[in-house]
Image (cartoon, helix red, strand yellow):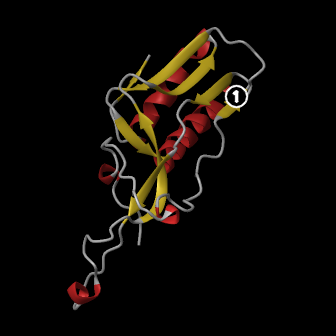
Amino acid sequence: MGLRKGKCYSNVTRPYTRKSKYKKKAFIKGFAQNKIVKFDIGNMQDKFNAEFNLISKEEIQIRHNALESARVIIVRRLTKDIGPSNFHFKLRVYPHQILREKKILTGAGADRLSTGMSLAFGKPTGTAARVKKRQKIFTVYTDKKYEKVAKEALKAAIPRLPCKGEII
């Protein structure tokens, strides 16, 4: 079975926390490994004179696999067009919110086997980053002469995210 759609997790609501008189039931035990490989990429020693940010236009949760997909496309385009020593890329958000999913049986006789929504705490399936409105998601530092390339690389990442983005 594959992943659920991103819209299942994109609304920002207070996470349900289980309150129990037994301590071992009150917290989530273990969760999926973060798929983001690197948060800083490129030339980190030089000082660049231009900064380009991809910001969110709305408050949303972004799953770790969407962030990694957008990061890969940005870095690939920047490396191919301007070279690895002419930019510094920074991922600004960290996926710390644990996403859970309650597996429900389907098919004949499932109503007799399934517990329905009782005991519906769910098992961890991934992580997501909480992003506020107008918060920076990605930042690219480069020189002014590479402005067009940096903006196009950030623009290519917007369709991979579940929110409307803007480049500043």
Q: Amino acid at mark 1?
A: Gly
Q: Say which of 127 and 119 sits in front.
A: 119
Image coordinates of residue 72 in percent, x first then y, are 57, 42
Q: Say which of 85 and 128 sits in front.
A: 128
Horizontal side of residue 141 vs 20, given as left or right: right
Q: Quadrant of residue 41?
A: top right
Image coordinates of residue 77 in percent, x first then y, are 58, 34
Image quadrant containing the N terminus:
bottom left
Name the residue furthest right: 45
Q: Kindly identify the residue that appears in the image at 58 percent across and 23 percent down.
A: 140
Q: Kindly identify the residue that appears in the image at 62 percent across and 19 percent down.
A: 141
Image coordinates of residue 79 in percent, x first then y, are 65, 33
Name the residue furthest front: 21
The secondary structure type at the circle numbered 1 is: loop
Horizontal side of residue 108 vs 125, given as left or right: left
Horizontal side of residue 12 vs 75, given as left or right: left
Name the residue furthest bottom: 109
**Other-residue count near label 1 (Cα within 10 Å), few / some / many at <14 / 14–19 / ≥20:** some
* Up-down relation of residue 56 to residue 17 (above or below): above
Image quadrant containing the C terminus:
top left
Q: Kindly identify the residue that appears in the image at 39 percent across and 57 percent down.
A: 19
* Up-down relation of residue 88 to residue 105 (above or below): above
Q: Say which of 158 and 82 sits in front.
A: 158
Q: Say which of 132 and 114 sits in front.
A: 114
Badge 1 is on which residue? 83
